[in-house]
Image (cartoon, rainbow, N blue to C red):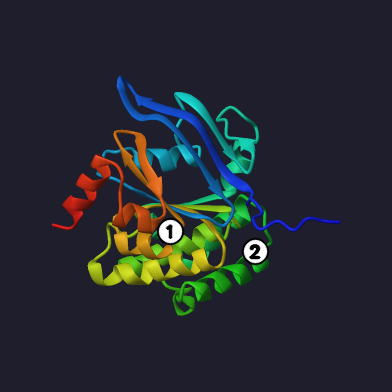
Amino acid sequence: MQLELDYIPKKSMIGVHGLIKDFGKTRVIDGINATVSAGEVVVLIGASGSGKSTFLRCLNGLETLTAGEILIDNVPLERKSSSLKQIRRQVGMVFQQFNLFPHLTVLENIIEAPVHVLKQDKKDAMEIARELLSKVGLYDKQNCYPGTLSGGQGQRVAIARALAMHPKIMLFDEPTSALDPELVGEVLTVMKQLAEDGMTMVVVTHEMSFAREVADRVLFLDQGRIVEEGSPIQIFSNPREKRTKAFLSRLSH
């Protein structure tokens, strides 16, 4: 007789063990342990300088670790490893500034990496790029140049560009912080759709409404440490730690 399980654990996509990151004599990440499961949306909150962006850069192999270990889909992320490039292809990242190539059209920006890095057939890459532009609501902008786009449109192209690499994980580093307030919503809408589609996501944001609505878990960072973590309801309605309460109190004033 086969037992039916009420709860089947989800596969771990990110594992962080004892992560430390120093810049010179300054410790920016101070012993973080964390896991992110497949399909989970984890939102990082905290004051500027708390280590959130550095933590994301460590997850994508953009920073050398001072100590500790990061596993991406159970494979160690090591800068000296020959598999680093392969692992990093599984992790898409969207920054505050979308950094599109100004001399390339929107479509050309999106197919650049799939064609030259993944060696994808150009015709196939263009077909996928158009599908992604439809997904982010910009199909009609495929032949435009970045200079003609609004900030929100540029950031949505950046998301499509990251998705074109077929990542298993998407990292977002304050993707709306450089946008005018009226453009924030269009980017968050795309991110919400990705979450609904089951994309594993780690998001640094000051948009608390997004964290409340979309996050499975919220991590509050302070001085390079995870001070508190929990569901959005627990963190925003009943935080346990004094530093979490103080941070959220400042936001409400």
Which residue is outermost to the top? 25
The residue carrying pointer 1 sits among few (fewer than 14), some (14 to 19) or many (20 or more) residues within 10 Å by Cα, namely: many
Front of the two marks 1 and 2: 1
The residue carrying pointer 2 sits among few (fewer than 14), some (14 to 19) or many (20 or more) residues within 10 Å by Cα, namely: some
Question: Quick check: 97 above or below 16?
Answer: below
Going by the numbered disc 1, the residue's amino acid type is Ala
Task: Name the residue at 70% across, 56% down.
Answer: 5
Going by the numbered disc 2, the residue's amino acid type is Lys
Please name the residue that numbered disc 1 is placed on.
Answer: 215
Q: Is residue 145 visible?
A: no
Mark linked to residue 121: none
- Rendered image quadrant of residue 242: top left
Task: Name the residue at 30% across, 56% down.
Answer: 236
Circle 2 SS class: helix
Question: Quick check: 88 above or below 23?
Answer: below
Q: Nearer the viewer, residue 233 or 204?
A: 233
Which corner quadrant holds the C terminus? bottom left
Task: Name the residue at 46% across, 37% down.
Answer: 58
Q: Position of residue 222 (x, y in %)?
A: 29, 38
Q: Does 204 sit left or right of 171 as displayed?
A: left
Mark linked to residue 122: 2
Q: Does 83 sit left or right of 171 as displayed?
A: right
Q: Position of residue 24 (x, y in %)?
A: 32, 21
Q: Nearer the viewer, residue 77 or 128?
A: 77
Q: Position of residue 228 (x, y in %)?
A: 36, 42
Q: Earlier in the sequence, mark 1 or mark 2?
A: 2
> Cβ–Cβ below 8 Å for labels 1 and 2?
no
Q: CA distance from mark 1 to mark 2?
A: 36 Å
